[in-house]
Image: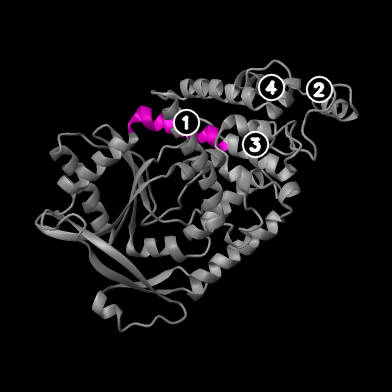
């Protein structure tokens, strides 16, 4: 399987197993004139970029640990008092780098959160995309419980740790760094406050005032699907009582949707809505897929809403209702980066793994100091989004995590002994079977 994350192109070159920072069977503390060191120097001798990256990483290690040579690392590993002093100093440096205000206890709390996010990245893949291989990619217990960057960093140079554990320590450090950048941006952009404001805007100005907050109408989409690609052929909206009499057979689906309503020209129009605020682990994965370390440039869909309506006409009425609702809330609303393939045309996404067959109306709405991603479907396009071959979101998740090289990046084959191409094909077939047979 080819990877887009090569040592030359990747901003995460310190993580790559084919680069100058690969985790080997023994820690990188060989004698300067040893055979291993000479071979390593020869490998990067004619590559100025890799040499520059090496110096940068080496200096970061020295600065964080408060040392000047690699020989001092062994002293820290075996001297608990010096190690505690180095950790306290590192916490101060990291707290200032990520703009964390407060006591050392507050810094430690954030570092623990970053460690949990790093673990959540791996757990999320084990839970779904790589679920059948969960035991193969389980993280070493000692690394799961570690949260202190100094402890993780020293593990890279500690011969008591197996190669896999040392790689996982390095991986956790890298993921914690991304989690820290994401947390810093969330604090700077007040994303939690804006998310609350977005929900208040919807409840106060968008949804029908006759319904209480959280009052939803239960409906089912009863659909038939084409044999060729399992796209939606017909769809009927059923009440909860009507759905009880239906037992889907091959090529049929019964899909639950819980709908709100919005009022347009004295008519209450049903709409299924799911609000999305990306969790930190999902944002970390997106940074990896995009080969970016800066959340400001790669994560532009922190606040999002997906809506499903009965018809294209209802979609148009909802978009108009949105802009009017914003005006009533004393804010202008502009729609940016509009992509509309509900009626015709192909979706021109640049995201690896996405299909041009995907039908949707997608745009960003800028209003009230927020920028919110809207993805709007009709019943038919929503069912295709769930079930159609080469379009279904479950298949898309597999493709994008494998085809961007993220799986290889997080679980390199030389350490985890996995045939990633075979696993990709197996998972696509497995999800397809789950979609069509259940």
Q: State the image coordinates of residue 319 (x, y, percent, origin top left).
A: 24, 48
Q: Which of marks 1 and 3 is nearer the N terminus?
A: 1
What secondary structure is marked by label 2?
loop
- CA gap between label 1 and label 2 equals 41 Å
Where 390 falls versus 285 (above or below)?
A: below
The residue at the point 66 percent across, 24 percent down is: 57
Say which residue label 4 marks: 58
**SS class, disc 4:** helix
Characterize the local packing of mark 2: few (<14), some (14-19) or many (20 or more) Cα atoms within 10 angstroms. Answer: few
Q: What element carries label 1?
A: helix
Residue corresponding to mark 2: 46
- Most foreground residue, 324 or 216: 216
N-terminal of the pair, mark 1 or mark 4, is 4
Estimate the spatial distance between the alpha carbons at disc 2 and disc 4, rounded to whole Å. 19 Å
Front position in the image: 239 or 384: 239
Q: In this view, does 138 lie above or below 232?
A: above
What whole-number distance in Å separates the C-alpha atoms at marks 3 and 4?
Answer: 14 Å
> Which comes before the other along the chain, label 2 or label 3?
2
Mark 2, mark 4: which one is toward the viewer?
4
Query: Is 186 within the magenta?
Result: yes
Q: Badge 4 local density, few (<14 within 10 Å), some, or many (20+)?
A: some
State the predominant SS element of the stretch in magenta. Answer: helix
Q: How far apart are marks 2 and 3 (CA)?
A: 26 Å
Q: Nearer the viewer, mark 1 or mark 4?
A: 1
Q: Mark 1 points at which residue?
A: 108
> In terms of depth relative to the viewer, which is nearer, 285 or 61?
61
Image point 49% across, 69% down: which residue? 435
From what the image shows, is residue 422 above or below residue 140? below
Marks 1/3 in contact by CB < 8 Å: the verdict is: no
Per the image, the residue denoted by label 3 is 170
């Amino acid at each position: 399987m080819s990877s887009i994350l090569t040592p030359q192109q990747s901003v995460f070159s310190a993580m790559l197993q084919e680069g100058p920072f690969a985790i080997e069977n023994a820690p990188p503390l060989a004698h300067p004139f040893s055979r291993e060191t000479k071979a390593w120097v020869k490998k990067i001798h004619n590559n100025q970029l890799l040499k520059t990256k090496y110096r940068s990483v080496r200096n970061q290690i020295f600065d964080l640990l408060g040392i000047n040579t690699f020989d001092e690392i062994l002293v820290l590993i075996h001297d608990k008092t010096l190690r505690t002093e180095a950790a306290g100093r590192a916490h101060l440096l990291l707290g200032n780098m990520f703009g964390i205000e407060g006591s050392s206890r507050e810094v430690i709390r954030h570092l623990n959160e970053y460690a949990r996010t790093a673990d959540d990245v791996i757990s999320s893949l084990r839970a779904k995309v790589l679920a059948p291989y969960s035991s193969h990619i389980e993280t070493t217990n000692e690394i799961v419980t570690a949260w202190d960057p100094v402890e993780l960093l020293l593990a890279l140079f500690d011969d008591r740790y197996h190669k896999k554990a040392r790689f996982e320590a390095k991986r956790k450090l890298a993921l914690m760094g991304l989690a820290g950048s994401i947390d810093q941006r969330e604090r700077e952009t007040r994303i939690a406050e804006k998310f609350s404001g977005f929900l208040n805007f919807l409840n106060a100005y968008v949804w029908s005032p006759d319904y209480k907050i959280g009052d939803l109408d239960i409906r089912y989409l009863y659909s038939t699907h084409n044999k060729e690609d399992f796209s939606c052929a017909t769809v009927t909206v059923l009440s909860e009582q009507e759905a009880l009499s239906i037992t889907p057979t091959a090529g049929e689906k019964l899909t639950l949707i819980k709908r709100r309503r919005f009022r347009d020209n004295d008519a209450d129009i049903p709409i299924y809505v799911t609000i999305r605020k990306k969790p930190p682990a999902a944002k970390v994965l997106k940074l990896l897929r995009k080969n970016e370390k800066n959340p400001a440039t790669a994560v532009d869909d922190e606040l999002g809403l997906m809506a499903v309506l009965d018809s294209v006409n209802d979609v148009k009425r909802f978009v108009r209702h949105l802009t009017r609702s914003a005006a009533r809330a004393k804010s202008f609303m502009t729609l940016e980066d509009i992509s509309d393939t509900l009626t015709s045309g192909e979706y021109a996404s640049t995201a690896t793994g996405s299909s041009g067959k995907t039908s949707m109306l997608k745009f960003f709405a800028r209003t009230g100091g927020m920028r919110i991603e809207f993805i709007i479907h009709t019943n038919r396009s929503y069912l295709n989004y769930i079930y159609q071959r080469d379009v279904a979101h479950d298949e898309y998740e597999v493709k994008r995590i494998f085809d961007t090289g993220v799986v290889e990046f997080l679980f390199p084959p030389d350490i985890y002994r996995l045939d990633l191409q075979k696993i990709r094909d197996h998972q696509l077939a497995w999800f397809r079977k789950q979609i069509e047979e259940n």
